Amino acid sequence: MKYDPVKKVFGDIVSRNTFLRKIFYFLLDLMFLRSWHVRKKVRELYPKGKVMDILDAGMGFGQYTYFMAKRFPGSKILAIDVKEDQVADCKYFFSECGYNNVTVETGDLTTMSYSEQFDFILCVDVMEHIVEDELVFRNFANALKKGGRLLVNTPSNLGGSDADSDDDESFIEEHARLGYSKEDISEKIARAGMKVESFSYTYGKFGTVSWRFGIKYPILMAGASKLLILFLPIYYLFTLWFVLILMWLDVHTENEEGTGVLVVSTKN
């Protein structure tokens, strides 16, 4: 069973029920360590209530759009994605919930042509899927106002999603690249006309273990047999506390290396 389709199954279940979708967002934020890191960094960069023009570049299920809509209610947020079904679902959700500051549109990061429109661009787990990544970095630079920030979360080249293991093809099959080294992504950002403000590794020694027990093994079990899905609540009953402690440690540790990277850059 592939990684993204598993999430899509749950996304489809909650697509037209705003209450269940909020529960879905809560579970994504709880179980995916990347969300811990991204939300922590956003809080560090901007105080609650700051008014900005924001782009969620590749919004996916809309969980980060939802986070920012609540944290920055006076901001204008544009959320785009190439997948029309997810765009339709997010349009419905934000409209039903009354988030009038959120606009959801179908958009391709390789062809977008915004000019000095945004103060902040968030791009989470998208760049690893795009072959023409330098083109997208240039588009981000063009879209940012002077002094604006880009936050990118993406796998590193050190085995993101356990990609160095023989049995993990299902976790990386849709990736255009294994991941980025610090030098690679920094150079591409610089060539696009931006400057790296901060770089940090995520999914270090604690986060890697939490990923395996919290996400990888349950998904592999679900893929092996539908009957094992019924076993998952019992599995998490014994492992969730352990997983959450490891995630907390990863977020509050300066990782010397890791299978994910979190990069903040500014428009020159």
Image (cartoon, rainbow, N blue to C red):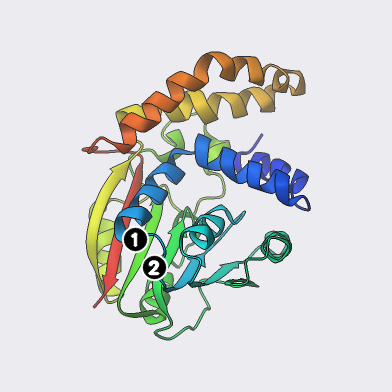
Q: Position of residue 174 (x, y in %)?
A: 56, 49
Which numbered disc covers residue 47?
Answer: 1
Instruction: Residue at 62% x, 66% y: name it.
Output: 99
Q: Residue furthest bottom?
A: 115
Q: Within 10 Å of the Cα at label 2, are there few (<14), some (14-19), or many (20+) other Cα atoms?
A: few
Residue 16 visible, this orientation:
yes
Tell whether 171 sits left or right of 122.
right
Name the element at disc 1.
loop
Q: Amino acid at mark 1?
A: Pro
Residue 50: numbered disc: 2
Where is 109 relative to 93, above or below?
below
Amino acid type assigned to the residue bearing label 2 in the image: Lys
Return the x and y of residue 96 as percentages of the image width and height: 73, 62
* Residue depicted at x 32% and y 33%: 250
Residue 131 spot, x, y in % from top left: 47, 63
Q: Is residue 255 left or right of residue 154?
A: left
Spatial CA span between label 2 and label 1? 6 Å
Residue 23 location, quadrant:
top right
Q: Residue at x 31, y 28 (%)?
A: 205
Quarter of the picture containing the N terminus is top right
Labelled pair 2, 1 in contact (Cβ < 8 Å): yes
Dot label at residue 259: none
Whether residue 155 is visible, yes or no, is no
